Amino acid sequence: MNKIRFREIDSSNIADYDFLRNDDKCLFLFEYTSGSHFSGGQTNQLIADLSISPKHRFKPAYARKQEALRKCSAYLHNAINWAEIGKMTFVPVPPAREASDPDFDDYITRMCQNIHPDADLDIRDLIVKSRPEPVSEEPPLPDILRNILVVNQDRVKPAPKQIVIVDDVLKTGSHFRVMHDLLQNQFPAAVIYGVFIARRIVSQIDLH
């Protein structure tokens, strides 16, 4: 695999994300074209495969999800600065569904766990949900998420130095915003990053 490098959300693209601030540290690998589905190229196919429901785990299509997860973990492994890995605490965005729901899917956690299965990575569910999150095409607004997401006090020690919030697609920045603010309040000395497999870009058809 060729070396893959993170790209930054910066002044050239931050306006695409309603809830990011200029001082946020967000990195991404690829670009996902909204509204293009499979015609958006390999990244759209990758994200579509990641989203295959666990209800299909006994169907042939589920193998595509497993392969997409493997690829995403490998991409992250390839892009991460391993000289800094010992300082990092990976915090997956929590699943949208409850554990009792047939559609419950902790694929972001599994993606993190497979970045390097043989390494003792610090992966923690530092943010959990106090109640179910509304499920829709667009992420909930931060004001809604602030009443849902909470710090998992059972997992706060030892205090992390560098927190890496991990998600598949940066859409509006709402989950990152609320998770960042909760974690910064809990760990004032920590440096917090957002890492995404892809950032969403809006296709021209969506602008009409």
Image: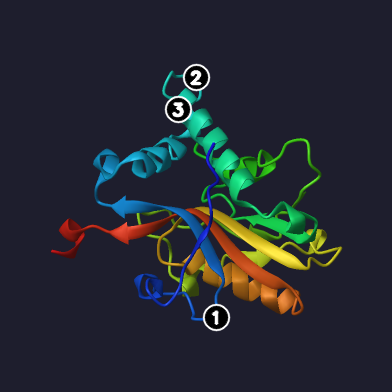
- Residue 44 in percent (x, y) is at 35, 43
Of 166 and 99, nearer the camera is 166
Which three-letter amino acid code belongs to the residue tagged 1?
Asp
Instruction: Please tell me whether mark 3 sits on a helix, a strand or a loop.
Output: helix
* Residue depth check, mark 1 versus mark 3: number of the one nearer the observer: 1
* Residue at figure coordinates x 44%, y 19% from the top left: 59
Q: Is residue 47 above or below residue 86?
A: above
Of 120 and 18, nearer the camera is 120
- Residue 15 in percent (x, y) is at 36, 76
Q: In this view, does 5 lie above or below 58?
A: below
The local crowd at label 1, few if under 14, some if 14 to 19, many if 20 or more residues have their Cα within 10 Å, is: few
Instruction: Find the distance from the CA under tag 2 to the CA under tag 1.
Output: 44 Å
Instruction: Find the distance from the CA under tag 1 to the CA under tag 3.
Output: 37 Å
Q: Which of marks 2 and 3 is nearer the N terminus?
A: 2
Residue 29 seen from this side: yes
Badge number at residue 64: 3
Which three-letter amino acid code belongs to the residue tagged 3?
Arg
Q: Name the residue under label 1.
A: 23
Q: Earlier in the sequence, mark 1 or mark 3?
A: 1
Question: Contact, CB < 8 Å: mark 2 with mark 3?
Answer: no
The local crowd at label 2, few if under 14, some if 14 to 19, many if 20 or more residues have their Cα within 10 Å, is: few
Q: Mark 2 points at which residue?
A: 58
* Residue depth check, mark 2 versus mark 3: number of the one nearer the observer: 3
Of 148 and 199, nearer the camera is 199
- Residue 76 in percent (x, y) is at 59, 47
- Residue extending furthest toward the left: 208
The quadrant where residue 43 appears: top left
Q: Earlier in the sequence, mark 2 or mark 1?
A: 1
* Residue at figure coordinates x 41%, y 39% from the top left: 46
Instruction: Please tell me whether mark 2 sits on a helix, a strand or a loop.
Output: loop
Along the horizontal axis of the image, is 104 left or right of 140?
right
Q: In this view, does 80 lie above or below 67?
A: below
